[in-house]
Amino acid sequence: MKTAMFLTILMLVFFTLVACTTMQPLEENLSKEEIFNSIEPGDEINLVTKTGNQHSITVSIVTEDIIIGGGKQFNIEDIGRIEIKKISAAGKAGMVATVGVAYYLMYFIISAIVLSGI
């Protein structure tokens, strides 16, 4: 019974986390420096080049001139629109809660195994 309750809580936290993650567009006509300051390695972005090609990448490297990710390199001057996946404060709290619940579940499972003598 307790295990079912813990799994239910874990699922609720997971769905809360997913619901709090959104793609947020950067403002149009940002300078190269503003784009550079808005994007960090590890960010997931959707971008559309000025020629209309769409790409979804995880950023590996960002400089004032280029964005590299997904084995591709993009010149910032050639990008027409960028959206960045951002996690809200509630999403960050959900991540912390998920890690805490997962830790507690693992502790509970390992304790049960040790106590049962398996």
Image: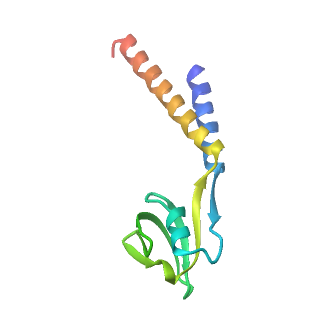
Give the residue furthest to the bottom: 51
Who's the residue at 64% across and 63% down the image? 24
Q: Which quadrant holds residue 16? A: top right
State the residue in front, 106 or 94. 94
Q: Where's residue 42, x and y in %? A: 45, 57
Q: Where's residue 76, x and y in %? A: 49, 77
Left or right of 74? Residue 100 is right
Who's the residue at 36% across and 71% down the image? 71
Left or right of 59? Residue 46 is right
Q: Quadrant of the C terminus?
A: top left
Please say if 81 is above or below 60.
below
Left or right of 24? Residue 3 is left
Who's the residue at 42% across and 69% down the image? 63
State the residue in front, 118 or 47. 47
Q: Where's residue 35, x and y in %? A: 54, 69
Left or right of 69? Residue 1 is right
Q: Which quadrant holds residue 96? A: top right
